[in-house]
Image: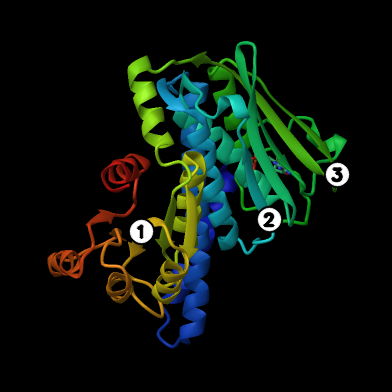
Amino acid sequence: MSHEIRTPMNSIIGFSDLLKKDDLALETKHKYLNIIDGNSKQLVNLVDDIIDVSKIESNNLKIITENFKISETLIDLEVMFNQLKLDENKSSIIFKAHVPEDCKHLTIKSDGLRIRQLLANLLSNALKFSVQGTISFGFKKAESDLIFYVKDQGIGISPDNITGIFERFKQVNTGVSKNKGTGLGLSICKGIVHLLGGEISVQSTLNVGSVFTFNIPFEEVYPLKSKNIEHKNEIQSFKGITVLLADDDSFIQLYFKEIMKLWEVNILVADNGEIAVEMYKNFPGIALVLMDLRMPIMDGFKATAEILKFDPKAKILAQTADLTGIEKVKIMKIGCKEYLTKPIQKEQLLTVFQKWV
Ligand code: ADP
């Protein structure tokens, strides 16, 4: 343990010291800062992991149950990891979540945050130990359990090394991937799965890939009937309509695509205001436009004005992360119906759809 803490700590102290020199070139300074940054993050991860391990060991990790829709957790993770892979320069890897057809609306009572943590841990390992291929993950319903899996086409683990893989600090020296992990992730997964009443296991073939599987006993929750029907009807009334999303952020694009897929709404995506105006002119019957205000080439203010010039009845909703008071007035003045503040939640989207579609 002391080695795990000392290594990043020594780098942080050492390179901070080097930074004190006056005559360092800017490039060198950036190099040192990046090293400090990387090691600090590694240290924070380690501290988080150690806290989790000690909570598990001392029986202090509390399971907090809540009702949650499992498909939403999976879709969130799919979006998040398809974004994270870009930071790791692994754009050819595809994360794909699979929700069984009969479980699309499955709501369960369990610890949603811990299940999310488990999947995120396994997904981040899958990313770390893959250079290409698809990382698929999902679950199926067995009698009283949900059986989750995370499958990758990565470097795999040899039979010799697979023994004890769920033990603390077990790391396989692969040489292929620069592993900045803590060697605690899988033991935390094991601890959490046990607390939730399940088991975790792995099957792996060297140079082919790995499948991690865990089961969790679950209790299905049936939402109040009237509310459920009401909610379903609301969403079904959007079925088949077309919305245009103008946003240059690939994360937001993916997020909206996933929600629209769930609601069976067609979505057109424009990377900038200019494309959005063209699309609006070329696709009749667009029910709603979700317009980001800050975009390259043509911003949302100009694009809104152009669309409204073409079709004064267009329903355009502005969406932005930060707005000044003056901008709010400006948005309403140019003819947007209203503005949504990022990050936009599904409930917020449902409310505006009900209002404007
Ligand atoms: P780490 O922080 O090193 O990832 P873990 O406990 O999460 O620690 O994993 C332990 C070891 O198991 C890793 O160092 C790696 O050698 C191996 N491992 C975990 N997941 C995978 C995977 N998906 N593919 C190949 N090897 C894996």
User: Does label 1 point to a residue whose CB lies under 8 Å from ligand 1?
Assistant: no
Residue 168 visible to an observer of this rendering: no
Vertical comparison of 126 with 251: above or below: above
Residue 313, horizontal then vertical, whole percent: 27, 62
- Type of the residue with mark 3: Leu
Vertical comparison of 198 with 256: above or below: above
Q: Which residue is mark 3?
A: 206
The residue sitting at the top extreme is 143
- Type of the residue with mark 2: Ile
Query: Depth check: 2 or 80 in front?
Result: 80
Structural distance between the alpha carbons of marks 2 and 1: 29 Å
- Assess whether mark 1 and mark 3 are in contact (beta carbons under 8 angstroms): no
Q: Name the residue: 31% across, 68% down.
A: 311
For label 3, count other residues whose C-alpha is less than 10 Å away and answer few (under 14), some (14-19) or many (20+). few
Structural distance between the alpha carbons of marks 2 and 3: 18 Å
Q: Which residue is mark 1?
A: 290
Q: Name the residue: 55% across, 55% down.
A: 84
Q: Which residue is mark 2?
A: 93
Q: Name the residue: 13% across, 65% down.
A: 325
User: Disc 3 on helix, strand or loop?
Assistant: loop
| The quadrant where residue 22 appears | bottom left
The quarter of the rendered structure image containing the N terminus is: top right
